[in-house]
Amino acid sequence: MTTESRPHRVVVLVLTGLLPFELGIPHRIFGLARDSAGRRLYEILTCGLAPGPVRTDADFAVHVEHGPELLATADTVVVPASHELGPIHSEGRLTEELAAALAHVRPGTRMVSICTGGYVLAAAGYLDGRPATTHWAYAEHFQRLFPAVRVDADVLYTDDGDVLTSAGVAAGVDLCLHIVRRDHGAAVANDTARRTVVPPHRDGGQAQFVDRPVPEPQQASTTAARAWVLDRLHEPLRLSDLARQEAVSVRTLTRRFRQESGVSPGEWITAQRVERARRLLERTELSMEEVAREAGFGTAQSLRKHVQAALGVSPTAYRRTFRAERTGSDAPSVSGRPVH
């Protein structure tokens, strides 16, 4: 989607009732992404339904210079959350003004929502028949209002190629970093995360943030087990080995692991192995068999199975794409689902 004459253009569409924090997320994450020569990889612009002040949910407004015509120039459109969605939230339909604004979006433009911004994409029909998420507190209402959408309330974000959605608030950071990682590789995303002082990838999903009774004080963390695993991803790992690090039973470890991370120990280990494989594919000349052994998948066949399931492409295609990106050629973006 990016041309040689300019960086990939991200246009953020702001609506009345905007949450200022979420407006800042795409500007911060995409604005910090740089290539190896220090060049900006994205151009970020903001538009409203009309130029001028846009009321936020805070005690100040933001002044937007561009109107909706700017959407016609976007490679990616981001819709942050708003607390004043009106008939979008109550009836699942766009206002005439918003429908006219979205009509400027070119076919094939990547559409992204943060938190309840997903209501806008759903009301516009972008999410019909597709996976999507939103803030866990709105997930049931979202599903009732848009039955054609495959709502997953447990994940931090969804990626269906040209349409991506995030859960509430800070999950927008996770999604934007995922997009940078998808577009330009783990090294660029990790550098962007370091500059922002946030983790490049958060484990688990929204389940860890849903309100639930406070665990008993004697329920220890699984941090020691996870640290132990990260040093041994290339080795065969058994749940009994992890449980031994915390001095608990396998059943107790599994229960605590899911409470704390939102996923099972096995799912978490697989996700970490995929991440290691991604780094090896991007940064080394190791053969597929060697990458498989180093990442803990054992065989190239197992590596292909897990990378394909997580990223939507084969290890060979993934390596080819990001090798081409680093050499400056116009590599296609890699479409993949988030690892969770």
Image (spheres, helix red, strand yellow):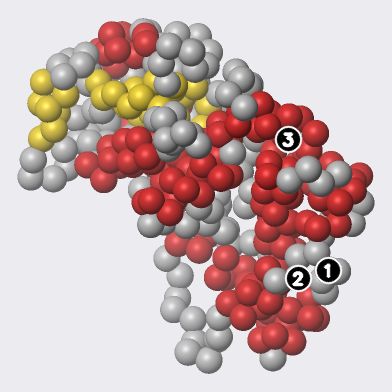
| Disc nearest the viewer among 1 and 3 | 3
Q: Residues within 10 Å of mark 2 (few under 14, many from 20)?
A: some
- Residue at left 8%, top 40%? 60
Please name the residue shown 56% across and 34% down the image: 184
Q: Does the residue at mark 1 contact the one at mark 3 (Cβ under 8 Å)? A: no
Provide the residue designation for mark 3.
319
- Residue at image position (53%, 27%) is 163
Question: Going from the N terminus, do you reach mark 1 or mark 3 first?
Answer: 1
> Which mark is first along the chain, 3 or 2?
2
Quadrant position of residue 245:
bottom right
Is 72 on the left or on the right of 58, as rendered?
A: right
**Residue 270 located left or right of residue 132:** right
Query: On screen, 180 above or below 127?
Result: below
Name the amino acid, label 3.
Arg
SS class, disc 1: loop
Q: Nearer the viewer, residue 284 or 124?
A: 284
Q: Is residue 106 visible?
A: yes
Q: Which residue is mark 1?
A: 235
For residue 131, the mark is none
Which one is in front, 282 or 275? Answer: 282
Alpha-carbon neighbours of circle 3 within 10 Å: few (<14), some, or many (≥20)?
many
Report helix, strand or loop for mark 3: helix
Residue 274 appears at what percent x and percent y? 72, 51
| Residue to which mark 2 is pinned | 232
Between marks 2 and 3, how big is the CA–CA gap?
A: 24 Å
Q: Which amino acid, mark 1? A: Glu
Callout 2 touching callout 1 (CB < 8 Å): yes
Vertical placement of residue 138 versus 320, above or below: below
